[in-house]
Amino acid sequence: MIALSTLVAFVPAALALNITPGADMMFCLGQGLKSGPRPAVAASLGVAAGGMVHVALAGLGVAAVVATQPGLFDIIRWVGVAYLLYLAWGAIMHPGGPEAPGQAVPARRAFRAGLMVSLTNPKVILFVLAFVPQFIHPEAGSVLGQFLIFGAIIGLGGVLINGGVGVFAGRARSLFAGGGAAARWMSRITGGIFAGLALRLAFLERA
């Protein structure tokens, strides 16, 4: 369906974008610091799943409508801001999470958080509309199918990069295990990351 030459051009560009530090990477970093390696990987999978939803909507033409409707765009954005602030508050008020010491944080919770953060970030909509269509060739077959293939490539790269960052943060977290002042500071750092992402999203420009 997709020419090899197109893939050769797309894959390095997608990896370069994945490696560039952004909101997704910082979110997975925060999850790793807060909950450990496994939830961080789950969060990266949630982010990738949300990205695939955006890609599918772009392929169907829905994302173009959202991007041209300021009211709907802002509703999505402010839901994302509120959710990130909620995560920030929880990280600060519950150092190490609400689970008992030694009990693993459910990965499904981290996955849902990553999915929610991705779905409520309208910048992803704009990114998909600006980047992916450059590699779409209608004569090659289904446009939606091409969008999904390119989205899967971006998502896989994101899981590898963002998940790796989250795992590294989760390993570093073990150095602060045991509660006390170190755990409280770790939670404050995590809460600060989430709050910073909320502010970034709040002042996101629709340029």
Image (cartoon, rainbow, N blue to C red):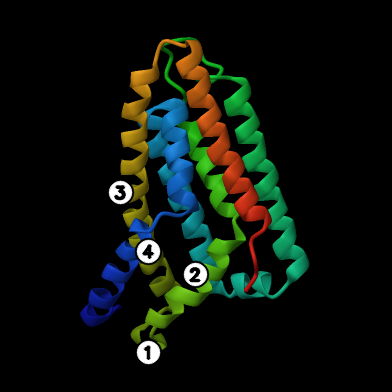
Mark 3 vs mark 1: in front: 3
Tell me the crowding category of disc 1: few under 14, some 14 to 19, or many 20 or more residues within 10 angstroms, Cα based: few
Between 37 and 198, the residue placed more toward the observer is 198
Mark 4 vs mark 1: in front: 4
**What distance separates the C-alpha of mark 4 from that of mark 2?**
12 Å
Contact between marks 4 and 2 (CB within 8 A): the answer is no
Tell me the crowding category of disc 3: few under 14, some 14 to 19, or many 20 or more residues within 10 angstroms, Cα based: some
For the question of whether residue 43 can be seen, the reply is no
First of labels 4, 3 by sequence position = 4
Between 1 and 175, the residue placed more toward the observer is 175
- Amino acid on which disc 3 is placed: Leu
- Amino acid on which disc 1 is placed: Glu
Q: Which residue is under mark 2?
A: 128
Contact between marks 4 and 1 (CB within 8 A): the answer is no
**What distance separates the C-alpha of mark 3 from that of mark 2?**
19 Å
Residue 105, given in percent of the width and then of the height, sits at: 46, 23
**What distance separates the C-alpha of mark 1 from that of mark 2?**
20 Å
Residue 17 is labelled as 4
Q: Relative to 108, is 125 above or below?
A: below
Residue 139 is labelled as 1
Residue 54, given in percent of the width and then of the height, sits at: 53, 62
Residue 162, given in percent of the width and then of the height, sits at: 37, 47
Q: In percent of the image, x 52 and y 15: which residue is there?
A: 99
First of labels 4, 2 by sequence position = 4
Tell me the crowding category of disc 2: few under 14, some 14 to 19, or many 20 or more residues within 10 angstroms, Cα based: many
